[in-house]
Structure formats: structure tokens, C-alpha cells
Image (tube, helix red, strand yellow):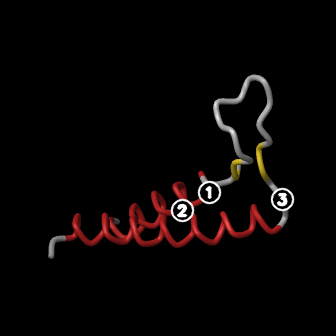
């Protein structure tokens, strides 16, 4: 496998794992966005999922370098 494929796979795995961990913390500590009149969602939604995306981005970048 080429280095780009390895970097992409690393980014996907790290991003998915960190997102799953962060989402469990958001539910445990009740870090949820509650629906209101301006919301598009009907149920409470976790708010910190972007942390996993950023972690995956940085992990893929670190492997690529």
C-alpha cells in the first residue's frame, strides 16, 4: 500500500474511534443540544462530534508526513 492509502486509513480509523469515544462522553455528561423552535432536529443531539473529525485529520496528516 502506498503512503497516501495508509494515511487515509489511519485518518478514518482514528476519526471513527475518537468520535465514538467523544459521543459516549457527551451522552454521559449530558452535553447535548436540546431542540427548540429554531432547531431542525427533534431529539437531543451530541455537540462535540467535531473533535473526532479533527483528531482523524491530524492523525492522517501525521502519518503522511
Q: Mark 2 or mark 3: which comes first in sequence?
A: 3
Residue 60 located left or right of residue 54: left
Residue 21 located left or right of residue 65: right
Q: Residues within 10 Å of mark 1 (few under 14, many from 20)?
A: some
Q: Residue furthest top?
A: 38
Expressed as whole percent of the image width and height from the top left, the position of residue 51 reads 62, 57
Q: Residue furthest bottom?
A: 1
Residue 9 in which image quadrant = bottom left
Q: Mark 1 or mark 3: which comes first in sequence?
A: 3
Kindly identify the residue that appears in the image at 68 percent across and 53 percent down: 48
Q: Which residue is mark 2?
A: 55
Q: Say if 63 sits above or below 38 in the image.
A: below
Expressed as whole percent of the image width and height from the top left, the position of residue 18 reads 57, 69
Kindly identify the residue that appears in the image at 78 percent across and 50 percent down: 32
Pick the quarter of the image with the N terminus: bottom left
Pick the quarter of the image with the C terminus: bottom left
Residue 33 in which image quadrant = top right
Q: Which residue is mark 3?
A: 30
Q: Residue furthest left?
A: 1
Label at residue 51: 1
Which element is circle 2 on? helix
Amino acid at each position: 500500500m502506498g503512503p497516501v492509502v495508509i494515511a487515509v486509513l489511519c485518518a478514518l480509523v482514528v476519526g471513527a474511534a475518537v468520535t465514538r469515544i467523544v459521543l459516549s462522553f457527551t451522552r454521559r455528561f449530558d452535553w447535548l443540544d436540546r431542540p427548540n423552535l429554531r432547531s431542525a432536529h427533534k431529539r437531543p443531539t451530541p455537540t462535540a462530534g467535531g473533535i473526532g473529525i479533527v483528531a482523524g485529520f491530524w492523525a492522517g496528516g501525521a502519518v503522511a508526513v
